Image: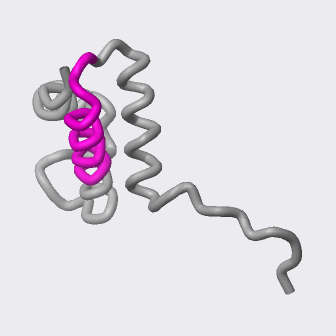
Amino acid sequence: MITGPARQPRGLPIAEAGRRVAATLRRSGVTMPDQDLRAVTELLIRLALSPLLNPEGQLDITDPAAIREYSLRYLARLVW
């Protein structure tokens, strides 16, 4: 039996992760408008989840150097 007040969930996992990533990017100096930042962070979260759920592909997710290069080449361009 569960007792005590139920906690209100803060949101769906992707939405919550997106809020956290957006806040971190904003603190890091990102200047893009909030609406664009929210859209990009959701996209980044979804892109990051894809290789974890299906690791077969071009990116070797076991190689930190490959992940860094991939991120700099393709993902960092989404943020300004």
User: What secondary structure is the stretch in magenta mostly built from?
Assistant: helix
Residue occupying image coordinates x 88% and y 77%: 3
Residue at the limit of the structure toward the bottom, as seen here: 1
Q: Looking at the rendering, in which quadrant would you find the N terminus? A: bottom right
- The part of the chain drawn in magenta is 31-48
Q: Looking at the rendering, in which quadrant would you find the C terminus? A: top left
Q: Is residue 6 above or below residue 43?
A: below
Q: Is residue 42 magenta?
A: yes
Q: Is residue 11 left or right of residue 7?
A: left
Q: Residue 20: x percent and y percent? A: 46, 38
| Residue 67, image quadrant | top left
Q: Is residue 5 left or right of residue 51?
A: right
Residue occupying image coordinates x 83% and y 80%: 2
Q: Is residue 9 above or below residue 19?
A: below
Q: Is residue 69 above or below residue 48?
A: above
Q: Residue 37: x percent and y percent? A: 26, 33
Q: Residue 10: x percent and y percent? A: 56, 55
Residue occupying image coordinates x 13% and y 26%: 77
Q: How many marks?
A: 0
Work out whether residue 25 or residue 5 is closer to the camera in this orientation and state it.
5
| Residue 75, image quadrant | top left
Q: Is residue 54 above or below residue 63?
A: below
Residue occupying image coordinates x 39% and y 55%: 14
Q: Is residue 58 magenta?
A: no
